[in-house]
Structure formats: structure tokens, C-alpha cells
Amino acid sequence: MLELGEPRLNLITAISNSDQEEKIAALLHSQGCNIIYRALNSDLLAKFLANNQLKINVIYTKNFMAPAKLKELSTKYSELRLIQLTEDLSSEELLNQLAQLTRPALLHQLARANNLIAVLGTPGSPGISTITNHLAVFKSAQVIAAVHHNLRPQSSAKVEMILASEFDKKLAVLAAGLTIIDAGSTLALTKTLSDRRMDALWLSHSLACAGNLIYVLAANDNGILYLDEFVSDFKNLVNPPPIYYVLNQQRFDRKGQSIQSKFLEVVGSFPTFQIPQDQRSIRSQADAGRPNHFWRSTTFHKQIQKIGNQLT
């Protein structure tokens, strides 16, 4: 028997198409729902229900099981609630139906706020935490970072390390000024948000509350490949916040020009920034709190300023 926490709505997915199931799972996790089982066929679904006498909601597609089997399950389990996915059922309509099944707290409690910025990037991407730190100094903002991100560089800005489970409490007492979230790395938000591990939970909370996103990638071939996958996946998100793409450690030689061209081609019409390779400027972040620091601007700092000026 499963022991499930009270705060989340318990759901089973019974969806024949794996791609559709993955998208629905990502949507549900991003809204604070708890998928306790992903049924592969009607027999396994029936077995799970027999072994777990819980108040459960099943999201299913018409071709997943025969009508007779559906009727049998709904008759046998009186507390079983069924929601059928159809081609014309939008994501918003699905969430509205789910909201009617339980208390209003179903939808994610983290409200999106314009003064919250989430900085994330590709796996292994240099500069996620560094750019977060520099932006925080330039905008006189504070940084929120995850406790499990214990190797991030130091900053002269205020940095508060918290657990993912403390996210909602922290946001409830935030000041009115700008706050920047060091959100970590991901290739595909829909896949990450359907993951239950700590990094995925942190990303899920960051996406739910951020008024703007900044996505950082390294200026190399791997960075472009990762970016292409992220951009393709990002289009599947429902009502995402505005996003800015940052090409980091850009070099201005022939190879760098090729990377730049590919970068602009992949991101299309999304706003972009390019930060040059400049280790001296990166290390100077420790002195960034000095009043005249930005008067001695390098190209690196000028790009940080351009990004910062786009943020509220």
C-alpha cells in the first residue's frame, strides 16, 4: 500500500501514446499534482487499483481500454474519478477540470511574480551561477540558490541558500526588490518537470514563480546542440514566462562567428545576448560592489548591463 502526502492531488495516467503521456505528466507536475502510477495497459491499471484503495483520479485516453473495462472499474471503485483526454481538450481545460476535483489549492501555490528572475542553462554550461551573481550585483538584487548547489561561486550580493521545500515560504516574505533564482541546468523542461528528484523540483518551482527566464549556454558545438533541444521542448510549455537566451564565453574568431550564426538561427525571434570570454572580468565580480566599478566597463560588463536593463 502507498502512503501518499496530503497536499497533492493523486493521479494515474492511462495514456496510450507515450509522447502525449510525457507532455501531460510534465504539465501535471508543474502544477503540483502527484502522479502515483503510469499505467501501461488496462490489466496493470486494474491490478494497481486493487492493491491501493485510495481516492484516485485517472486521466485516460479513449483507446487505452475497452468501454466494458472502463465501466467495470468505475463501478467497482466508487471513489475513482475519470477524466478523458480528447483531441479538443486544451491544457487549460484539463487543469480546470482537475481544479473541480479537490480544494482550490490544486493549482501550484507559487504565483508568478515580475520581480523574480530565474537563470538556468544547459548541462555543464559555464556561467549560470556567475551570470546570476553579476546580474544581482548590477541590479542590487538578492540571489536565491538551492542548498544542494553547494559549489556555486561566491558573490558580493546577498545569497540565500534554501531547500526546494522552503520555496513557497521564502517567496511569501520576499521584499519588493528584484530577486534572481539560480535555477540550475536542464535540456528539456517538460522532461525535467515530470521528474521527482531534487533538481527537478527546484526547477519546477523556479519556472512556476519566475516572471522572466534567462537561459545560458556555452559558445561551442555542444552548447548549440543542447540549445536546439531546449528550444524545441520549450515550445511545448503552457503559458511560459518570457525568456532571454545568453551565449556565454563567446570568441570572435572564425569558429566563434560560426557558433554565433548557429545560435541566432536556433533561437529565432527570441531576445538574445552574447557575453565574451573574459576571465579577468568574471573574477572582478568580487569588486563589483564598488561605486565606480561599472565606470570601468569591459565588453563583459556592458553585456551584463544590457541584460540587467531588460529586467524589471
Image (cartoon, rainbow, N blue to C red):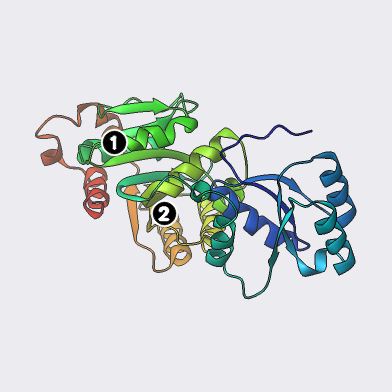
* Residue at (78, 69) in percent of width and height: 62
Q: Is residue 237 above or below residue 219?
A: below
User: SS at mark 2?
Assistant: helix
Q: Which of disc 1 and disc 2 is earlier in sequence?
A: 1
Please give the residue where the numbered disc 1 appears in the rendered image: 174
* Disc number for residue 131: none
Q: CA distance from mark 2 to mark 1?
A: 40 Å
Q: Is residue 49 left or right of residue 150?
A: right
Q: Name the kind of residue labelled 2 in the image.
A: Gly
144 displayed left or right of 263: left
How busy is the neighbourhood of tag 2: few (under 14 within 10 Å), some, or many (20 plus)?
some
* Count of marks placed on residues: 2
Q: Position of residue 184 (x, y in %)?
A: 47, 39
Tell me: 233 left or right of 35: left
Residue type at mark 1: give it: Leu
**Quarter of the view holding residue 255:** bottom left
Estimate the x, y position of residue 60 in percent, counting from the top left. Answer: 74, 61
Can residue 127 be seen at all in this image of the molecule? no
**Marks 2, 1: nearer the viewer:** 1
Disc 2 marks which residue?
256
User: Which residue is painted at 62% across and 75% down in the image?
Assistant: 88
- Decide: is 205 above or below 91: above
Q: Report x, y in % for residue 38.
A: 75, 49
Helix, strand or loop at mark 1: loop
**Callout 2–callout 1 Cβ contact below 8 Å:** no
In-front residue for pair 70/108: 70
